[in-house]
């Protein structure tokens, strides 16, 4: 297919496709003339992957390049692909030394993870994110310790076990890697969205005035187009 058809099939504008080609995110098509090339279904699939990483995962093009490079590098073990996705999601280290309260929170988080018997990379960005969440709560006057995260850890453990067990290692490597990366990024976005929706629902139920509905069911909130 020509690049115009590739744009139609993938629903990615042609200028954006050309940008991905220049950035090395999308591999070149088979050249058929000086200024023409043919593209395949693999290009459509790759564009869908890039869109998932940028639009759902919110990754920068540089982060996407790192993820795609790991996907294409067959020397990268499958277990390491999860780390690649996690590091791409951030947070990105800013190079500044941690404060005293951040160091204290990191120590508490490490003890918490040890108690859960979770095997994690000591440099995992999520470890620092959890510590920063604890620091932020305390700065806002909340008298909490790391055990406040225990209910969330139990739910996360069940979800993660289900997600990882659903990965089929007998598939071709490229498909397995994509399942790992997309599972991490897309389902994380879905989890955040569902938690917000559930919280809105329960808040509306608890805080509504007696005998008065403060929220309509989602299907009734808007007139169908």
Image (spheres, grey):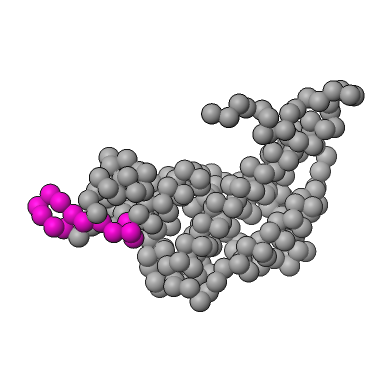
Q: Residue at x 55, y 71 (%)?
A: 168
Residue furthest to the front in view is 224
Classify residue 192 by image quadrant.
top right
Q: Residue at x 78, y 24 (%)?
A: 214
Residue 146 seen: no
Quarter the C terminus occupies: top right
Quarter the N terminus occupies: bottom left
Between residues 108 and 168, which one lies in front from this camera angle? 168
Count of residue discs = 0
Q: Residue at x 68, y 59 (%)?
A: 159
Classify residue 212 by image quadrant.
top right
Residue 156 spot, x, y in % from top left: 70, 56
111 in relation to 94, above or below: below
Q: Is 82 covered by the magenta stretch?
A: no
Q: Answer with left or right where residue 95 lies relative to residue 29.
A: right
Q: Residue at x 9, y 52 (%)?
A: 34
Residue furthest to the bottom in view is 170
Residue 78 spot, x, y in % from top left: 50, 70
Residue 173 seen: yes
Residue 197 spot, x, y in % from top left: 69, 38
- Magenta range: 31-43
Residue furthest to the right in view is 210
Q: Answer with left or right where residue 84 lies relative to residue 154.
A: left
Q: Answer with left or right where residue 44 lies relative to residue 163.
A: left
Residue 63 spot, x, y in % from top left: 43, 50
Q: Is 37 covered by the magenta stretch?
A: yes
Between residues 14 and 90, which one lies in front from this camera angle? 14
């Amino acid at each position: 297919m020509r690049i115009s058809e590739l744009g139609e099939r993938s629903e990615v504008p042609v200028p954006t496709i050309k940008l991905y080609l220049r950035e090395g995110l999308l591999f070149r098509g088979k050249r058929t003339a000086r200024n023409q090339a043919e593209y395949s279904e693999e290009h459509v699939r790759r564009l869908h992957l890039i869109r998932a990483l940028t639009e759902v995962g919110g990754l920068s093009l540089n982060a996407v390049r790192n993820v795609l490079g790991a996907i294409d590098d067959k020397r990268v073990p499958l277990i390491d692909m999860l780390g690649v996705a996690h590091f791409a999601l951030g947070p990105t280290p800013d190079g500044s030394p941690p404060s005293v309260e951040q160091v204290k929170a990191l120590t508490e988080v490490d003890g918490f993870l040890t108690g859960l018997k979770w095997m994690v990379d000591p440099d995992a960005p999520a470890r620092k994110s959890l510590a920063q969440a604890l620091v932020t709560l305390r700065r806002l006057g909340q008298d909490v310790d790391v055990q406040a995260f225990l209910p969330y850890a139990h739910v996360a453990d069940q979800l993660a076990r289900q997600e990882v067990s659903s990965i089929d290692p007998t598939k071709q490597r490229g498909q397995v890697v994509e399942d790992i990366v997309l599972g991490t990024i897309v389902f994380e976005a879905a989890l955040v969205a569902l938690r917000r929706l559930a919280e809105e629902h329960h808040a509306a139920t608890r805080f509504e005035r007696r005998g008065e509905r403060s929220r309509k069911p989602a299907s009734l909130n808007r007139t169908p187009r």
